[in-house]
Amino acid sequence: MTPSAARRLARFVTGLRLEDVPSPVVTKATRLVLDTLGCALAATRYDFGRAARETAERLGGHHESTLVGSKVRVAAANAVLANATLAHGLDFDDTREDAIVHTGSVAVTTALAVGEALGASGRATLAALVAGVEVMCRVGLAVPGKFHARHYHPTALAGTFCAAAVAGKLHGSTEDQLVHAFGICGSQAGGIIEYLADGAWTKRLHPGWAAHAGVVATLLAHAGFTGPESVFEGEHGFYRAFAGGCDEARLRELLESLGSVWELGRLTFKPYPCGSIAHPYMDCALRLRERHGLTPDQIAEVRCRTAPGPVPRLWEPLQGKRTPQNGYAAKFSLPYLLAVILVKGRAGLAEFEDDAVRDAEVLEVASRVGYELDPTIDYPRQFVGHVAIRMRDGRQLEEHQEHARGGAELPMGREELVAKFRGNAGLAMAGEQASRVIRSVDALAGAESLRALVESLSQRGDDP
């Protein structure tokens, strides 16, 4: 009898050893830790971050896992509720493109919280992190684009299984216990994308809730609680409920590649703190600006080719996207994103403050940005960018980009990622403290415990 999808995943997770993971993948996993922690540290100074941490403190529990940017320790399930929300809250964290999932916000925060609670080594923590990323990516890759099409956030759905894989690996779950944990996760999955209507904060919470649910599912399974083994492919299972079904051959191929194909190696690190689908377009706009010395008054019209899939999230309603209600809504508005690049030549965290998105010059250019559908773009397997500008003097300028920068095809090197980390961490801590975090992450694979890393994150230095 063919094992269930949940059992195949559980068998992989329980059997994984870090020495079986190729060295480049382990290196990328370590960089994923650094990138995720930088995103989380930057978020600690924002209102949504304070709300998440205050809630975790109120929930409390055993003092076993540290809240990022604080000396407060709470139960691991409550720590990840806050820490994963922080890590994803600025939309600056990694993406696995085809699956459209953000992995580090769930896998890294869960690995560190549960690893700290259990006194795990750095090596065990990295192994659990890798296992969680591989599970999360495959859950999303089985149905590319289908979660979004049914108004769900893929990270919110797939993240529960990721967190259970990470927590189960660190807790030493048996295969059966992890199968039950996955079954429990199916009933905890959720996360609609209605935040697009007004830039509300719920997307930020999705990885936090998913991580919380995955840790709780692991604890329940260890206590003997059961979940359906057919959680993924069953008649009333996860894929039928959230994606309208699943291509069984595709799922089987993804499961068969466990341990030989490493999806973690295909992660994309973000150069901009906004929706990753927009990044190739933004790079195109930046090149046009720099190569031609464009000024806003020269631009008559901006047109982009796009696949139908991203339209409800990045383009429509067009007038609303041209005038985003707040900084968070602007992160999912291609008219704003292109306009801010064309006007200011940058799109950092400062460009997504609420006051910044009301800049009259930027909004004027945004009002001239539109799109046309291109069904030849194989979204979400392709994140391409295309920007065509009609100038007032009649010239036509055009740029195209086949891949998102920061991914396997156009990678961000270590120096770029360290610089990104320092920029993010610098919002929460002094430079020497940030250096301690970097050194601790670099040494993670050989660390006997997570103590040095946790202390470097929790000790609050002088304001930078």
Image: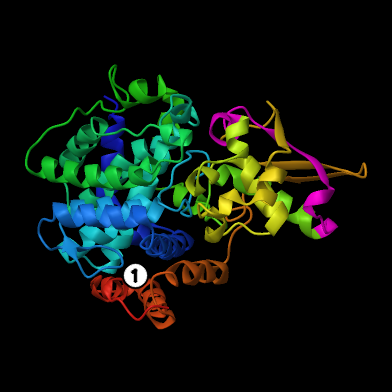
Residue 305 is one of the magenta-drawn residues? yes
Residue in front for this viewpoint, 289 or 169: 289
Q: Quick check: 144 above or below 444?
A: above
Amino acid at circle 1 = Ala
Quadrant of residue 143 within the rendered picture: top left
Q: Can residue 130 be seen in the rendering of this structure?
A: no
- Which span of residues is magenta-colored? 291-317
Looking at the rendered image, the quarter that the C terminus falls into is bottom left
259 sits to left or right of 381: left
Q: Quick check: 132 above or below 236?
A: below
Residue 110 is one of the magenta-drawn residues? no
Q: Residue furthest top?
A: 235
Tell me the colour scheme of the image.
rainbow
Give coordinates of residue 460: x percent, y percent: 30, 76
- Residue at the spot 33% in from the left edge and 52% down from the top edge: 84
What residue does disc 1 label? 445
391 sits to left or right of 52: right
Give coordinates of residue 10: x percent, y percent: 26, 41
Residue in front for this viewpoint, 255 or 31: 31
